[in-house]
Image (cartoon, rainbow, N blue to C red):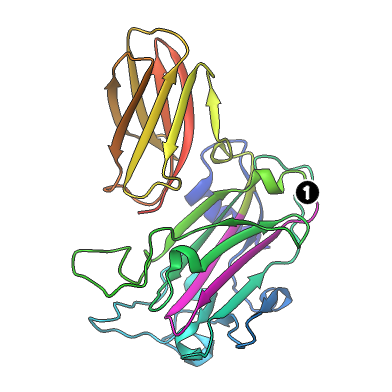
Amino acid sequence: MKNLFTLLLSSIFIISSANAQVFWSEDFDTDENFFNWDNEDPSLNNALWTWCEGIAVGPNEFCPSIWDDGLNQQVPFAALTSDNGFITMDSDEVGSLPSNHLSTITTEAIDCLGRSGVGVQFQSHIGVFEVDASTGAIFAVSNNGSDWTDFFPHPELLATSPLPECVDTCRWSSNPLIVDFDISAIADGESEVFLRWQWEGNFEYHWSLDDILVYENNTTGIEQVGDASIGIQISPMPVVGRMDIRLSFADVFETGEIQITNLVGDQIINQRINNNLDQELSIDMDGFASGIYFVSVIADGKVNTKKIILTN
């Protein structure tokens, strides 16, 4: 763990509450900790994760190759601290395989004993060619090393040929994509929590990771707070582009509105809602950056709030 790194990133990305605390972090400024992790390929294709020393154009220093052309649309990893090192799985360097690789990297046990509202954040950049990242690239969490809960960092990223009008569905994710998951249901109060990144692919580009934070007591770890008489259901989750919201009210009300704010409390959307007890609406989030937002519904002074994760 790096204390200076923790203070830097916690102030930039996730800390919007005085109660929030980053208690574990890794920015890969050395390969020492990385080599203590479990680095495996159960497919027996020997497609393993490597440590890249900075953003030098690879494949030297175990860094991925950079194909700077119109077809591949590839640029160096732009994570906050990528210049001091990151980890990568270079599927392109492994080449075409008789069967898909299943490249897996797993942290050592992280002590979450006495912690609550645990969340994890990391910065990611992935490029695919044959296998969709929406299902092939998985982040998973376990509190015993054998039973895993899967999360999908790139739910809309497909292995399709690039088209001029598309961005996140054209082989490459955002660079970097800041991913944040609420893992409190698995991690809270557990003495041994494991994080795992697993990539099924075959002659893809590469998947790079950096700047991993594990934190507690942040409002992003609260799925829904406030007055239970206001029901809020949001889909899809994570939100991609447009979100559908279903509202239900236990009590008749006269005036109501919906507000959407970002992590630092800036209000980005505010609109009136009708006074039906059950209603549905759709809100376009396509123009906003990926990250965490809060949807608050106010009806005659009663408030309920739900967290969303936006992955544009």
Quadrant placement of the C terminus: bottom left
What residue type is disc 1 on? Answer: Glu
Residue under label 1: 190
Observer-nearest of 220 and 165: 165
Q: Main secondary structure of the magenta part?
A: strand
Residue 187, percent from left and from top: 70, 48
Compared with 73, 118 (above or below) is above
Position above or below: 11 against 253: below
Residue 179 within the segment the image draws in magenta: no
In the visual, does 219 lie left or right of 143?
A: left
As displayed, is residue 299 above or below residue 148?
above
In the figure, is residue 107 to the left or right of 169? right
Image quadrant holding the N terminus, namely bottom right
Q: Report x, y in % for residue 306.
A: 48, 32
Which residue is pictured at 43% across the width and 81% down the height? 204
Q: Give me the residue at 58% from left, 40% from top.
A: 221
Residue 266's image quarter?
A: top left
Q: Position of residue 158 (x, y in %)?
A: 37, 67
Residue 211 as seen in the image, left or right of residue 244: right
Q: On screen, 206 above or below 164?
A: below
- Disc 1 secondary structure class: loop
Residues in magenta, as a range: 190-213
Tally the marks: 1
- Residue 71 percent location from the top left of the image: 25, 81
